[in-house]
Amino acid sequence: MADHVVDGANGFVASHLIGALVARGDSVVALARAGEEVVRRRVADALTTLHLNPALAEKVQVERFSLAEPELGTSTSEVFAEPCTYWHSAALITFFPRREAELHAVNVVGSANAAAAFSRHAKPGSRYVHVGTAYQHGTTQGKALEQWPEYGHPSEFRNDYEHSKRTAEVDLSRTELARKGAVLVARLGVMVGHSGTGRALSDLGIYDFIRVIALFARRTPGERVRFVCHPRAALHLTPVDGTVDRMLALAAGPLDRPVRHLVPSAAVPVTDVFAAISRHLPVELVAVTAADVEAEPFGRFEAIVNMRCKFTSPYFRYEYGFESHEDAEPPPVTPRILDLLISWYVREGLPE
């Protein structure tokens, strides 16, 4: 039986990770700010998504913790009683402005506290996995490489969230922990639901965009809405089931390549995403260039929708490339899977 410690346990990725771990018989200590009931419910939901027994959530040991405290606000002697794999998944994810200080406190200082606590208390043979984002590459041109990053100025990123995740990686790269080769950085793509059913317990990323579109489409059906997009814009949509499988395999293998991109080799064109949404909601989404909008300015309805989508639509305006290798690539999102993801969320995930 392997031992794992997972922080941010009630998060989307972490809850599915914990579900997969307990289902294979591993021992898991789940660290979360949320209460025990919330964590167990999230893990049970994740187990259901993964077609596993939700009752296995009762096997998880849940402990309160705080990234704001150097000792994580928990009993480190108990948490690190055995050699373990520590999964640092806790993060603040928001694209809203004026949250820079909060993002820095959680994603940068909090990440440093987690790594430091692990370094002080983890038993020999333990491993540290930092869950990051492939989009920490920011708006830098060219392919993002699987290597430790250099510091980037805030102006090089679409939002403060990306900048905070880059800074956390830079700080981690300078630790003794990284120099000893006991670290894996797992950079994830745009997380989506289960590849077999489309089920998703998340309102982030593409789901936030769908929610906004649905709000306007149902109020004013039949409208056309244009978004400025890069001609080759595509999103690295990453199903949670394939992602968890890859995370487990990489964390158990050699750590000679500490930074890995867990993104599919084939991204999904934004035009395909728009078409899938338009099939399931009474709206026509259209990808256009900035020159198109200059020639035909947004109407009032289009302008309002674009304003409400201003935190996710910037991701349509770039072409992304990520270095990746077959052992880290989750299966791609095919047209069938994309339709499942969109249709499930429109049917089951949207607020009434």
Image: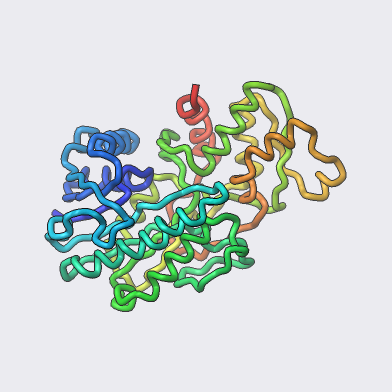
Residue 193 placed where, x, y %? Answer: 43, 39
Residue 192 placed where, x, y %? Answer: 46, 42
177 above or below 275? Answer: below
In this picture, residue 209 sits left or right of residue 295: left
Residue 190 placed where, x, y %? Answer: 50, 49
Rendered residue at 62%/67% (across/down): 142
In this picture, residue 173 sits left or right of residue 9: right
Q: How is the image coloured?
A: rainbow
Q: Residue 205 or 92: which is nearer the viewer? A: 92
**On-image quarter of the N terminus:** bottom left
Q: Residue 181 or 194: which is nearer the viewer? A: 181
In this picture, residue 254 sits left or right of residue 236: left
Rendered residue at 87%/44% (across/down): 295
Rendered residue at 23%/38% (across/down): 36
In this picture, residue 195 sits left or right of residue 136: left
Rendered residue at 45%/26% (across/down): 348
Residue 52 placed where, x, y %? Answer: 26, 36
Q: Residue 113 or 220: which is nearer the viewer? A: 113
Residue at the right extreme, as displayed: 295
Numbered circles on residues, count: 0
